[in-house]
Amino acid sequence: MLRRLAALGGLLVGVSVIVFTMVRLIPGDPARVLLGTSGGDTEQLASIRAQLGLDEPLPVQYFRWLGRVFQGDFGRSFSQQKPVSELIVANAVPTLQLTLIALVVAFVGGVAVGMIAALKRGSVLDTVLMGSSVLLLSIPSFWLGLLLLLLFGVQIPIFDVLGGTGLSGAILPGITLGLGGVGYIGRFVRSSVIEAHRQSFVVTARAKGISEGRVLTRHTARNAVLPVLTITGLQVGGVLSGTVMVEMIFSRPGLGRLLVDSILARDYLTVQAVVLLTCLMYALINLAVDLLYPVLDPRVLRGRA
């Protein structure tokens, strides 16, 4: 655990360097963006750059920003003239709603599809389910979002699909994000269950006369869940990156929309903070998944010993 935490710290420092460098490669000058179409004269540009600290060497800017981050201060947004932490808090809840709904849809749907396909291996149902999984994996989230928006926002107006900040407005975008994960997790669950069915302890359980349902729940499922848990943790990254497009399509506030608006406004500090916190969230979830391994399967600790 200590090794993983140390690696996590190194990862965040590396991400901070990459993000700090990349946002400054974006064409455009924040000072010119703030001055608007008039552009201002050279003295005005120099004055604004000095106020924003952009006239200092890049290493000085980086270490000054990193020092403030360690104190919990992400700076002040160039474009919105508000503390970056305030903007993140205001936009984090809608994004977390989408993420949780998408992960629930992906996990529950993927496990159901994978289990049914594994139990009906080689049948027409198995072929249909796996073909549908490939289809869900292949459809881009922005195109799927537009289809669902057209269907449930225009043809059959069931959900609050445009700009809804409540839970009802997050259901359809969350489903849009989660359907791709259903295909990914479903295929993985199918392989894990089939592999677990071949193990000797399953054969022994059946030889003892244990019912098929109990063999599935007590033996097969428990041993197939570990790799599925890992894949679900990795899905968090895909879901978090997908919120950028989905929030734009459904006109929802959130960290993804904040990130896009900040990039267009050359708002360096906001972009750096959003990317860094997203990376931290992704890394912490995968760390939690790793720490759950020995809880779900004590053989992990025995193997390391």
Image (cartoon, helix red, strand yellow):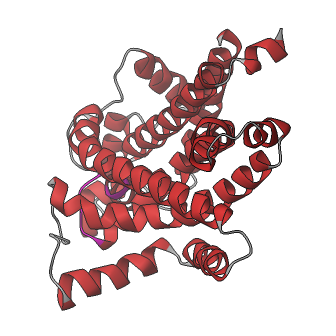
Q: Is residue 252 left or right of residue 300?
A: left
Is residue 58 at least partly visible in the picture?
no
Q: Nearer the viewer, residue 55 or 124?
A: 124
Residue at x-position 40% and y-position 58%: 243
Left or right of 118: which side holds 99?
Answer: left
Q: Is residue 190 above or below residue 131?
A: above
Q: Is residue 114 visible?
A: yes
In the rendered view, tell whether residue 221 sits above or below residue 263: above
| Residue at the bottom extreme of this rendering | 155
From the top left corner, tell me how far across and down residue 257 is, in percent. 33, 58
Residue 62 or residue 275, whichever sits in front: 275
In the rendered view, would you say 17 is above or below 171? above
Residue at figure coordinates x 34%, y 23% from the top left: 73
Q: Is residue 142 left or right of residue 148?
A: right
Whether residue 110 is situated above or below residue 282 in the rendered picture: below
Q: Which residues are magenta?
A: 250-257
Magenta-span inclusion, residue 245: no
Q: Quadrant of the N terminus?
A: top right
Asked if residue 252 lies in the magenta stretch, the reply is yes
Q: Nearer the viewer, residue 156 or 266?
A: 156
Q: Main secondary structure of the magenta part?
A: loop
Residue 11 figure quarter: top right
The location of residue 112, given as percent across then percent down, is 51, 59
Q: Quadrant of the C terminus?
A: top right
The image quarter in which residue 88 lies: top left
162 sits left or right of 255 in the view: left
